[in-house]
Image (cartoon, rainbow, N blue to C red):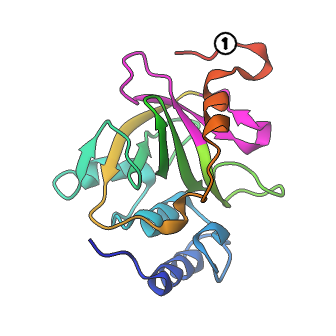
Amino acid sequence: MKRIPRTLLRLALAAASAVGTAATAHAGSLLDYVGQCVPFARAASGIQIYGNAWTWWEQADGKYERTHQPKEGAVIVFAKTPRLPFGHVAVVSRVVEKRVVMLTHANWSRQNGERGHAEQDVTLFDVSRNNDWSDVKVWYKDVDGLGGGVYPVYGFIYGHAHAAAELTSRNPDYVGALIDAYVPVSGEPIAR
C-alpha cells in the first residue's frame, strides 16, 4: 500500500479548507487543520468518501471493509443524532486496549473559543453493553475529560491506503487514555 504524499495531503487539506467553511487557508500539517471533520478524516485516512459524516457507513458498503473492531487508521462513523445532526467521523490513531482507543479528528472540542481544530490522540471509550463499540464516550477538551454524552456509532471503516503519519504522537499518553476512560470525572460512575 502506498502512503499519501505529504504534498498531496497538504493540497487536499487546503482544497477542503477553501470549500464551505471558514477554515485555515493553508494547513502546514494535518494537525494545523481547521474545518469540518469529513475533509479531515478523508485526508488523514485516505478513505475517499464524500458527504455528511453519518452517510459514510452506507457509502462504504462494497467499497471498503466495515467492521466493529477498531484498528489504527480506521475511520469511526458516528450516527446522526439531535446533538450530531451531520454525524461525525474520526480516525483511530492508537488502540490502547479492548475498550479504549485514541483518535485524531477535527471539529469536536473548542480551542481558543472556536470549533474546527484538529485534535491528536484523544480518548474514545466503548461504553456499549455488548462491548461492540455501538456506544462511545469521547474526550472533550472543554471539560478536560470524557464528555457527558454517549454517542451511537455505526462502526469502523478500514481504508486501502496507509493513514497519515501525523495521526499519533511519538509518545501518546496511554496512561492518560486509560485514566480518562476508567476514572470518573466529578465523582460520577461512567455508564457501561
Specify the quadrant that holds the N terminus: bottom left
Q: Is residue 89 visible?
A: no
Q: Position of residue 168 (x, y in %)?
A: 56, 57
Closest to the observer, 69 or 66? 69
Horizontal side, residue 14 vs residue 97: left or right? right
User: Residue 87: x and y, percent?
Assistant: 48, 45
Residue 47 in view (yes/no): yes
Q: Position of residue 83 (x, y in %)?
A: 59, 37
Give the answer, above or below, for where 23 lies relative to 107.
below
Whether residue 143 sits left or right of residue 179 in the image: it is right
Tell me: residue 160, above or below residue 6.
above
Which residue shows up at 55% across the image and 42% down it?
84
Amino acid beneath label 1 = Pro
- Image location of residue 88, percent across then percent down: 50, 48
Residue drawn 41% across the image and 64% down it: 163
Point out the residue furthest to the front here.
171
Q: Residues within 10 Å of mark 1 (few under 14, many from 20)?
A: few
Residue closest to the eye, 135 or 52: 135
- Report which residue position mark 1 lands on: 189
